[in-house]
Image (cartoon, rainbow, N blue to C red):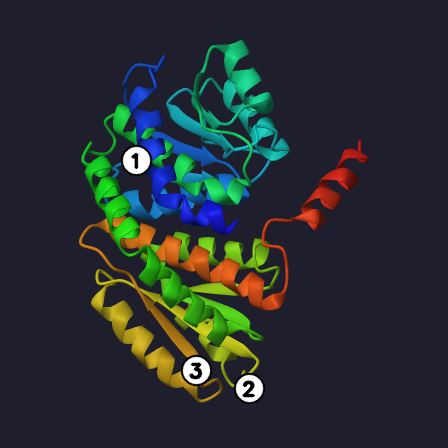
Amino acid sequence: MKQLVLDFPLQLQEALIIGKNHRFITQPRQFSNIVVTGLGGSGIGGSIVQNYVFDKLNVPFVVNKDYSLPAFVGKDTLVIACSYSGNTEETLMALQQAKKKRATIICVTSGGKVAEFAGAKKLDCILVPAGMPPRSCLGYSLVQLLSILNHFGLIPGNFDREIKAAIKLLKTNSADIQKKASVLAKKMFGKLPIIYSAAALEGVAVRFRQQINENSKLLAWHGAIPEMNHNELVGWRDDASDKVVIILRDQDDFSRVQARMEIGKKIAKKYNPTILEIYSEGKTYWERVFYLIHLTDWVSVFLADLRGVDATEVRVIDYLKGELAKVK
């Protein structure tokens, strides 16, 4: 897993090439809405892109993480089906529904049944390298989502320049990023992580939580600001010394959100002195987002080392799939 995390900048570089070289069957057209359907490591890219396009698209962009699609999906919908393995049962069912509803479908996968379905139905299918844990392949799937949106004229083509800048940033600061991650992991060790971010970066916070779950084999939760100020904040009234608060921060966080973070820190410190802040670095949006993702990925594997667990294994998910296979 450490090698996979280390190779993340190279993955982004390869992902750009894959997206550029794909020859789309579907010609550019307009859509009334867009749905990205995928789960886990295959779906988190959709959540992060959803944050990115929030103030850029004039049509709804929905991320679906279930067996069924929203009722509004139809012939004017773009459905992007993301399944790294190509065998995610929820995504396969949603894919079949998308076809019945006559939506325009683009698949992103490494193979499996999704690739077979795309081939049989003559759908666009962007193939990415196989053989890795889905959570380690975020770069492949996320960049393909941007490439697809750019193909249909939904976002400008300069995203690739930002990603190239991010690659350079991550490579240049690799040693420093790992050093910071190691320090953070040691401060988090033995405590339950509570991750907070601005709503505009919630996808990155979810990614961090999921990496702690899968790599560090540890429960965690996250909250988005300002929403958590209207509910979860009230829960801060008992001793929480067994927990650690991590706040993801970015220079573009809305001023009122930054004020809420500062006030929230004062409240949380009454019950838990361990509050860590992780600041993004970089000039562009994707530099800062990928910096946070890469840094927190390293945190999750260093935390796995401290806990004495294998960051790669996910036996409990394999068990779940085995039990589900028995259910008719």
Taking depth in this image into account, of 169 and 20 the one nearest to the observer is: 169
Q: In the image, residue 263 lies at what x, y percent?
A: 32, 80
145, above or below 309, in the image: above
Are dots 3 and 2 in contact, CB under 8 Å? no
Q: Residue at x 62, y 59 (%)?
A: 217
Residue 215 visible within the image: yes
Taking depth in this image into account, of 146 and 74 the one nearest to the observer is: 146
Quickly name the residue at label 2. 238
Mark 1 falls on what kind of element?
A: loop
The mark found on residue 244 in the picture is none
Q: Amino acid at mark 2?
A: Asp
Q: In the image, residue 104 lies at what x, y percent?
A: 41, 20
143, above or below 113, in the image: below
Q: Amino acid at mark 1?
A: Val
Quickly name the residue at label 3. 268
Mark closest to the chain's N terminus, 3 or 2: 2
Q: Quadrant of residue 100?
A: top right
